[in-house]
Amino acid sequence: MILVAGSANLDFVVRAHHIPAPGETVLGREFQTFPGGKGANQAVACARAGGATTHMLLGLGQDPFAGPLEQSLQAAGVQMHVVRMPHLPTGTAFICVSDDAENAITVAPGANGGLRPEHLPTLAGFSHLLLQLETPINTVTAYARAARAQGVSVVLNAAPARDLPSELLSLVDVLIVNEGELAVVAGHDGTLAQCLERISVPTVVVTLGHRGSVARHADGMLEQGAFSITPVDTTGAGDTFCGSLVAQLSQGQTLQQALRFASAASALACTRAGAQSSIPAFADVQALLSATHI
């Protein structure tokens, strides 16, 4: 059983020919809202794509934006532990998606910033705690500390990228980052291997986009290729990877098996629009795995 503690945002998404450069105005096209936020996306991925029993701790305002987030989590089968914050708005994100499926995202944290150490529910029965960095860093550290004390595996997706306290890193069992985040956490802009050498976390997983993913753990390095797809929208693909990976680890799969499953799930997420709306069902991931041998 997995507890995800993190952010939930309502995403305001505009499609455009390209992502605007600083000072540039771009004429957009379609506009939609989608449930999002790294924490909520990863919780949906754990439950829907990964097939794991999943709970989520989240902060929400008392406003109309909270409703779609709760409905999406409930539809995915996620058990919610909601901290209601009438004095803060529900988190929002403003996303531009380009025709080549890239995106640029600005987040207004709102109630996500109100999560405090005392909001953590009991960890009895949980095997993994999955964290991100869209909530206060002192709260993330406190949650990791509590999980370590109770024998719960701590998984941190270090996104958005930022310098991390040494105490937090010392409490993490599995760190999941992309290449840019890896360089920030390592405090080094060298090669992948050089950055990995500077991080003492037992298992580090690095996503490489269309080049797949790699993991460094006690037995050495693992590699996983990417599944070939035609991308529509990459929003939420990284979150789908994180949630799916942890779901498989919580169900006793090896790290190599979990990497392959997460790569397939995140590839499918790139073929659909939105964040949580793009996360595939477990059966769809299994079908892709059966049809593809990488």
Image (spheres, rainbow, N blue to C red):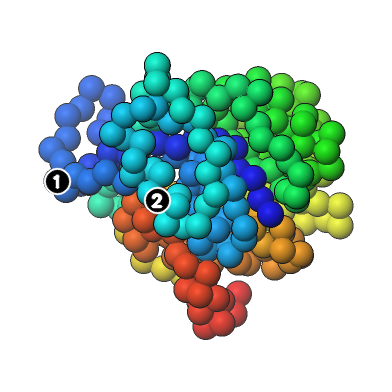
Amino acid bearing label 2: Ser
Residue 29 badge: 1
Q: Position of residue 222 (x, y in %)?
A: 74, 60
Residue 79's place in the image compared with 289, above or below, is above
Q: Where is residue 80 in the image (x, y as percent from the top left)?
A: 53, 44
Viewer can see residue 236: yes
Can you tell which of label 1 and label 2 is closer to the viewer? 2
SS at mark 1 in the image: loop
Please state which of residues 121 and 283 is positioned toward the viewer in this rendering: 121
Q: Which residue is drawn at 76% across and 44% down?
A: 124
**Circle nearer the N terminus (1, 2):** 1
In the image, residue 249 sits, relative to residue 120, either above or below, namely below
Q: Residues within 10 Å of mark 1 (few under 14, many from 20)?
A: few
Tell me: residue 224, above or below residue 154.
below
Query: Label 2: which residue?
Result: 72
> Looking at the figure, which quarter contains the C terminus?
bottom right
Residue 90 image-quadrant placement: top left
Please name the amino acid that badge 1 sits on: Arg
Residue 96, by quadrant, is: top left
Quarter of the picture containing the N terminus is: bottom right
| 81 or 88, nearer to the observer | 81
Which residue does the image show at 25% across and 52% down from the upper left?
A: 99
Identify the residue at horizontal 83%, vertical 38% (top origin).
150
Most foreground residue, 174 or 81: 81
Residue with the most extreme bottom position: 291
Residue 146 at x, y percent in the picture: 77, 31
**Which numbered disc covers residue 92?**
none
